[in-house]
Image (cartoon, rainbow, N blue to C red):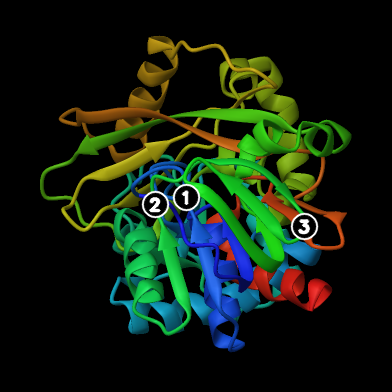
Amino acid sequence: MSVSSEPTDLIVVGAGIVGLAHAVEAVERGLSVTVVERDERAVGASVRNFGHACITAQTGEALRLAERSRATWLRMGAKAGFDVAECGAVVVARSTEEAAALQELAESRGSEQVRLLTPAEAVALAPVADGELRGAALLTRDLRVDQRRAAASLAEWLAAQPGVRMLWSTPVLGVEDGLVRTGRGELRARQVVLCVGHDLDRILPETAEAAGMRRCALQMLQLRAPGLRLDPALLTGTSMLRYPALAGTEGAEALRARWREQRPELLDASVNHMLTQLPDGDLVVGDTHAYARTLDPWSSEELDRLLLAETGHLLGRDDLAVVRRWRGVYASTEGDFLRARVSPGVTAVSVTSGIGMTTAFGLAPTVLDSIA
């Protein structure tokens, strides 16, 4: 099947969350849109993540975009028919350094965004082993999104809108002003937005190189935990070292210094040990981080065992069973976002810090404003 050359206002290349967010924003502005995706459905970072919109732990532009994105997630969940829960995230403190980091965050953000919890209150929200708990915090603005359904539901909603074409299994070979060359023929539009994440170097290698783009590989697990109920996302001290609003605290810096001596394996693998629960009750557990322009193809069983052991210790359980293992991959640069105006009619967009689910719906309006 060849594609039609009838022009549209906007072509979006990539039907992951970032691309779909741009298509949704364009539809709401009354534009005609063609979405081009090389696969028959979204199978990348948009479905391999935690389903956690981590809003409160961001800073700067990422925080502003996350807050804007939050409202759109709630609206589109209702429109497109997938679950978005305002259940927040619980960050547990199992050391004095972690408790200090949460105290600093609460003081900077206020009780409406960060509610400090006693150990008993934390256990009531998240079934953690309470022997080491020094306290916790509830990040009230965070959302839980059904990541296994969201992209497909958004694509179905878009396909039903006037002026929208969804072209699946259609690889893009090249782009230029007003033109996208695909394996099925040429497409034309007033503007083209490339939302292909870490694969930007497959289409525009010089743009990716100029941004210093690398790939970040994650190891993640799906675990069966009979009888466990976990509504909010569950974050640990490792999360405090990765999310900027916490990583910048004195408590987090002290924790990092101690772990250099006592837990170097967590720092070496850049572990962000956190959990979310799928609708069927299984836990999504992760994650480790490895960076390279070209990633090694191997997964590490040692890292999987580390994640499993950390989860068993956190929950006080020895009956967790691995259901699935996978590697996620996302684009990485020094900043949170890549927005490159390649030519007057072509813009490349990537979320480059692993917060695509958190910020995509806030990012898309800024991009469309810039090319209006």
Would residue 106 be seen by someone viewing this image from the given angle? no
Q: Which mark is residue 37?
A: 1
- In the picture of the structure, the residue carrying the numbered disc 2 is 168
Q: Callout 2, which amino acid?
A: Trp
Residue 315 in percent (x, y) is at: 30, 40
Residue 165 in percent (x, y) is at: 44, 69
At mark 3, the secondary structure is: strand
* Residues under numbered marks 1 and 2 in contact, where contact means CB atoms less than 8 Å apart: yes
Specify the quadrant that holds the C terminus.
Answer: bottom right
At mark 1, the secondary structure is: loop
Residue at 65% from the left image edge and 24% from the top image edge: 259
Q: Callout 3, which amino acid?
A: Val
Residue 257 in percent (x, y) is at: 75, 27
Residue at 55% from the left image edge and 72% from the top image edge: 33
Mark 2 or mark 3: name the one nearer the start of the chain: 2
Residue 150 in percent (x, y) is at: 36, 63
